[in-house]
Image (cartoon, grey):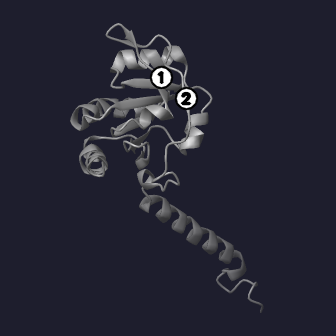
Amino acid sequence: MSSHQKTQSGFSWGMALPLIIFASLAGLFFFGLQTGDPSKLPSALLGKKVPQFDLPPLEGLSEKGKPVAGLSSKDLARGDVRIVNFWASWCVPCRDEHPYLVKLAAASKAPLTGINYKDKTVAARRFLGRFGNPYVAVGVDTKGTAGINWGVTAMPETFIIGGDGTILHKHVGPINGEIIEKELLPAIRKARSKG
């Protein structure tokens, strides 16, 4: 009797082996998904200057009667630590994180700038009208080119930028109170201590 033939009980190792291999690989894949933290994705840009960009303002967005400015790489190298947040009105996690952005801007006293990613102007303005505008500037990345250059993989993403325009910290996914206290505020304090 060969190893591929059925035993008296009807069991065949030849038929069971692929199923065992598949189940083992599925188990390893599932375990791998459970242990990874997407907010800790490595970024090739950490420690490097922000990519060159010049984004127009969100048309029709104003604050206290004045138009809100767009955003460029030059704006992020003016000597003060800044926060850059990629967001979109179509992004459900962006809605969840928005109240925390308001808290982050107040707690950090660092200018919070937004990059509106692949969005419609009216929808983006409506989003900020409904949830509030915590941003001192909003650049519009209609085609997603800036997002690609920054290495953005998901919405929302938040970056801490040093006063010289260097990317010092990246957080993937929505922020919350715990992330502000344990991750972002310490990163901002560390950036300020470096001058």
> Which disc is residue 175 wearing?
none
Crowd around label 2: few <14 · some 14–19 · many ≥20 (10 Å)? some
| Mark 1 residue element | loop
Of 74 and 25, the residue lying toward us: 74
Which SS class for mark 2? strand
Residue sitting at x 53%, y 54%:
44
Does residue 116 appear left or right of residue 191 in this picture? right
Q: Residue at x 59, y 41 (%)?
A: 148
Q: Nearer the viewer, residue 112 or 143?
A: 112
Q: Amino acid at mark 2?
A: Asp
Vertical comparison of 36 with 80: above or below: below
Please report contact status of discs 2 and 1: CB closer than 8 Å, yes or no. Answer: yes
* Residue 88 appears in the figure: no
Toward the viewer: 29 or 49? 49
Residue lying at 47% horizontally and 10% vertically, measured from the top left: 60
Amino acid beneath label 1 = Gly
Give the residue at mark 2. Answer: 54
Q: Which mark is residue 70?
A: 1
> Where on the picture, by quarter, is residue 102?
top left
Q: Residue furthest bottom?
A: 1
Q: Residue 158 location, x and y as percent?
A: 41, 41
Q: Position of residue 49 (x, y in %)?
A: 49, 46
Quarter of the rendering containing residue 142: top right
